[in-house]
Image (cartoon, rainbow, N blue to C red):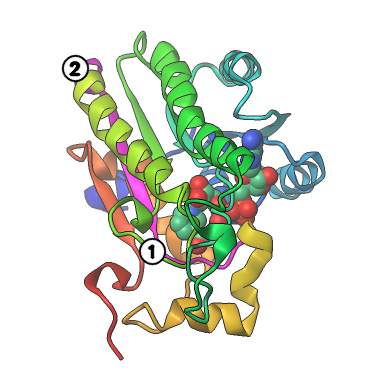
Amino acid sequence: MSATLQRFDVRGLACVVTGAASGIGLAYAEVMAEHGARVSLFDLNATGLQAAGQRLRAQGADVRTAVVDVTDRAALQAAFERSASAHGGLDVLFANAGIDAGPGFLTPGNERNPAGSLEGLDEAHWDAVIATNLTSVFTSLRAAARLMKPKGSGSIIVTTSNAAIINEAIVGTPYMPAKAGAASLVRQAAMELARYGIRVNAIAPGPFVTNIAGGRLRNPADREAFQVRVPMHRVADTEEIKPLALFLASQASSFVTGAQLVIDGGQMLGRVD
Ligand SMILES: NC(=O)c1ccc[n+]([C@@H]2O[C@H](COP(=O)([O-])OP(=O)(O)OC[C@H]3O[C@@H](n4cnc5c(N)ncnc54)[C@H](O)[C@@H]3O)[C@@H](O)[C@H]2O)c1
């Protein structure tokens, strides 16, 4: 193997993925497990978690699962500690769990949508999006910093969104500040933790076909509403995020910190009809 390819080696690394039962988090867990890392999968969804854990173990991976709600700070901290005891510390964290944005102030058909307007927004949904998509990133970063600092090394990857950078009318309003906040937290943590050998980066996806929002990108009308906003005129498969995850988790990205790597088929560049 070339010296360059060796830098992607993650064998034996202890890794935690939050929101690992489905979609992008499952892809992170799969690519790390396939390449020999020891992976702890955290998720609320016990059934999905069990299925993912069994499948990866059947492939010979050293995988454990923990049913945990990332918005429960004490439970999340405890899950990190149990995982570190079982896997000999923590080398890589993917803080990925996130929930649906809710309705945008425009429908996919470009109609005004009262349920997504500032006046109509459900306050409980606002609180849930901030708790899951932003505050849990802080809780996860803090737990990881506690475990990684004594080792003097580590890589933390946060799933943000291109919505952290560009606003989108058909995506729910609470998602924008939650993801922008998570992106800002990544940069702040990267500055603080650099001296301890810990790198912190973000992956900012555009539309990927997952189970988020009821798996709406599998619905042709919804998919088209997103595709027209993407210069490559398609949505993505979660397989496409795996190489980027491996890059950021490994020494292949040894001088990359505080970055937000966008993977969105050019959506950030603007619409091309
Ligand atoms: N799919 C996309 O198009 C897209 C685009 C940009 C960003 N993202 C982000 O990617 C991340 C993963 O989303 P996805 O699209 O794979 O969705 P998904 O619904 O397929 O997977 C999310 C997983 O997180 C889990 N989860 C949700 N709330 C949780 C909680 N409180 N505690 C523990 N686990 C919880 C869910 O059970 C689920 O297994 C999210 O942060 C999302 O905002 C997704």
Which residues fall within the magenta stretch? 194-210
- The answer, for residue 176, to whether it is visible in the render is yes
Camera-nearest label, 2 or 1: 1
User: Considering only order in the chain, which callout, 1 or 2, is on the residue closer to the N terminus?
Assistant: 1
> Crowding at label 1, few (<14), some or many (≥20) Cα neighbours within 10 Å?
some
- The foreground one among 15 and 23 is 23
Q: Which residue is situated farthest in the right direction here?
A: 47
> In the rendered structure, does residue 217 fall within the stretch colored magenta?
no
- 273 vs 95: above or below: below
The type of residue carrying mark 1 is Glu
Query: What residue sits right under mark 1 in the picture?
Result: 168
Q: Quadrant of the C terminus?
A: bottom left
Residue 107, horizontal then vertical, whole percent: 53, 73
As drawn, the label of residue 241 is none
Residue in the image at 52% along x and 76% along y: 108
- The foreground one among 93 and 189 is 189
Residue in the image at 43% along x and 25% along y: 138
Query: What residue sits right under mark 2 in the picture?
Result: 195
